[in-house]
Amino acid sequence: MKILVCISKTPDTTAKIAFTDNNTKFDTNGVQWIINPYDEWYALVRAIELKEADAATSIHLVTVGGADAEPIIRKALALGGDEAIRVNADSHDSFFIASQIAAIAKDGNYDLVLAGKETIDYNGSSIGGMVAELLDLPFISLATKLDVAGAQATIVREIEGGEETCEAALPLVISCQKGMAEARIPNMRGIMAARTKPLKVVEPVAAESLTSVAGFALPPAKAGVKLVDPENVDELVRLLHEEAKAI
Amino acid sequence: MSVLIFIDQVDGHVKKASLEALTFGADVAAQTGTTAEAVIIGTVNDDLVDLGKYGVKKIHQVSGNGFNQFDSQVYVNAIAQVATATGATVLVFSNNVNGKALAPRLSAKLKAGLVSGAVALPETSNGFIVKKNVFSGKAFANIAVNTAVKIIALSPNAYKTTAIDGKAEVVSFQAEAATPKVKIVSVNKASGEVPLTEAEIVVSAGRGLKGPENWGVVEELAKLLHAATACSRPVADAHWRPHNEHVGQTGIAIAPNLYIAIGISGAIQHLAGVNRSKVIVVINKDPEAPFFKAADYGIVGDAFEVMPKFIAAVKKLKGVA
Ligand SMILES: Cc1cc2nc3c(=O)[nH]c(=O)nc-3n(C[C@H](O)[C@H](O)[C@H](O)COP(=O)(O)OP(=O)(O)OC[C@H]3O[C@@H](n4cnc5c(N)ncnc54)[C@H](O)[C@@H]3O)c2cc1C
């Protein structure tokens, strides 16, 4: 089985969110970059587990980004990817990025394309669905479990108020979230091996950008907390009812 | 020309997220001088005509064999046919579970720029710019949509529904059905509970509650307030609570009217998923807990002592014995 895992570089979850250039650019000053947690913890680790169960599986990674994305790709290789492809382009447009991934996926004839459910920076949750449409493949979103037997996959996905189990024949595109796998950390052997694993850089295919970022804004600051005496919880309920009108 | 809103249904009912999408879509139609129309797939128990009170004029109902179960390919094919037939220039989805499966697919199919997680009406004085959540609720981005047809997936709980007088005309739409490739074999739903993303009130607890056996007070308060329950990540990781209750940067992002956090420290990753809540109440025994900085109301105290009093006070307010 051939699996393609989409990997995106995002700011660390503790990164300070600030903007420069008249609020048009994310301030990367001092920011640590990580693999988008949904891509790493769920999509990639589940792919690795599938490979551990079936050694004939190969895992390719794809990222659309500049050379500064290479450290996080090496980390993904250290965790267990076999080879990686970086499409040399910087874009914030989901359709442009999905077009690049779809082109790679088409070339590589993958059985599974796995993506995280969203990135923690742009929160688009768009790439998986777009790639599926561009490849004319089924798309199973927000998956919490994935098993493969032969050419058939069984997936559990989130639905409103619960979950459903579905089956589909490969090839498929799946977006992954919590439940799929448990986070891992790369070991020394993996880190050493990752240095020599292939990381191919390709130029982007021609594709449109359908959207662009016009600017950013920060939410207004909170006014400050009103503390209530623990001996007087009635007062909290009164405030929530009369002042905040929340209950 | 029209604004076309996708009406999502769950077990034959139109949910709040879709009513928000309808109100939003009707307001976009008013803003752009077009009419609000909607598409629904499958049959529902609710009276669709009545949805006219959210401003939608005409509802196209796609039903029949091939549309009995959710499949993103089948649904998107049908929605695209309705979009073409109605000359839709803006399509509106809720950015809920099904919206996340459909809107991106449709965007790629129609080459229509998508803004997912939108929180406000588009700004149309100079182009078409939509404000959305980014950085997991820590900031907003204004996204310019540069295509003739635009798709907006509205963040749940971000736009208030308004009901006016009105009736919608319901017409059946004969859509060509694509062959479904995904087979649903079983469905597992927690019955009677309020879904987390739609809840007006969320009662949430963290590691401060010590163990799953202590969640009784959380559930009792939630029941009294018709609230959903949530938890912090370590609580879900330890399997004290199910994964689908985990809120935060790597869990579910929510924006209820009221978020009550019990024994949660308020780590930055937790706040990322809940800081769009309108009112935040924090109960924590540590006055230095970072959550107090993000809170509107707080009690510095032991949850095991405060919660029974909290429940008693709410019972008194609600007139429950
Ligand atoms: C990449 C990454 C992603 C993450 N994503 C998420 C996420 O999505 N969601 C999330 O929640 N976390 C996330 N985390 C974890 C986060 O950093 C915190 O570790 C976590 O939120 C802490 O959970 P907690 O507040 O329940 O536990 P703790 O930090 O242990 O806090 C427990 C709190 O309970 C209080 N307490 C103890 N006893 C009592 C009592 N008797 N009465 C009242 N209060 C009491 C304590 O004072 C303390 O403030 C993430 C971390 C990383 C690194």
Image (tube, coloured by chain):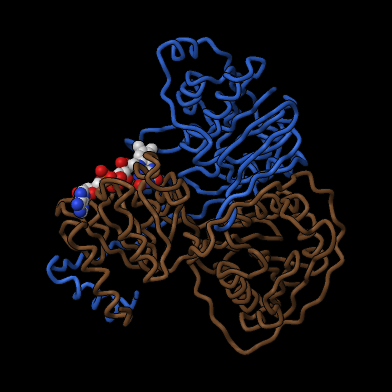
Please identify which colour was used for chain A in the image.
blue
* Relative to A118, A226 lies left or right: left
Q: Which image quarter is the C terminus of chain A in?
A: bottom left
Residue at the location (61% across, 57% down)? Answer: B145
Please indicate, yes or no, whether residue B280 appears anywhere in the rendered image.
yes
* Relative to A109, B285 lies left or right: left
Of the pair A94 and B278, the residue shown nearer to us: B278
Residue B151 location in percent, x, y?
65, 59
* Relative to A95, B268 lies left or right: left
Quarter assignment of residue B254? bottom left
Residue B84 location in percent, x, y?
81, 63
Residue A102 location in percent, x, y?
70, 35
Residue B137 location in percent, x, y?
41, 54
Of the pair B88 and B234, the residue shown nearer to us: B234
Residue at the location (56% across, 67% down)? Answer: B17
Q: Is residue A28 above or below residue B315?
A: above
Of the pair B147 and B58, the residue shown nearer to us: B58
- Which chain is in brown here? B
Q: Is residue B148 above or below residue B206?
A: below
Quadrant observed for ligand 1 in the rendered image: top left
Residue at the location (51% across, 67% down)? Answer: B120
Residue furthest to the bottom: B165
Please indicate, yes or no, whether residue A28 appears anywhere in the rendered image.
no
Residue at the location (27% across, 56% down)? Answer: B262
Q: Which image quarter is the N terminus of chain A in?
A: top right
Residue furthest to the front: B321
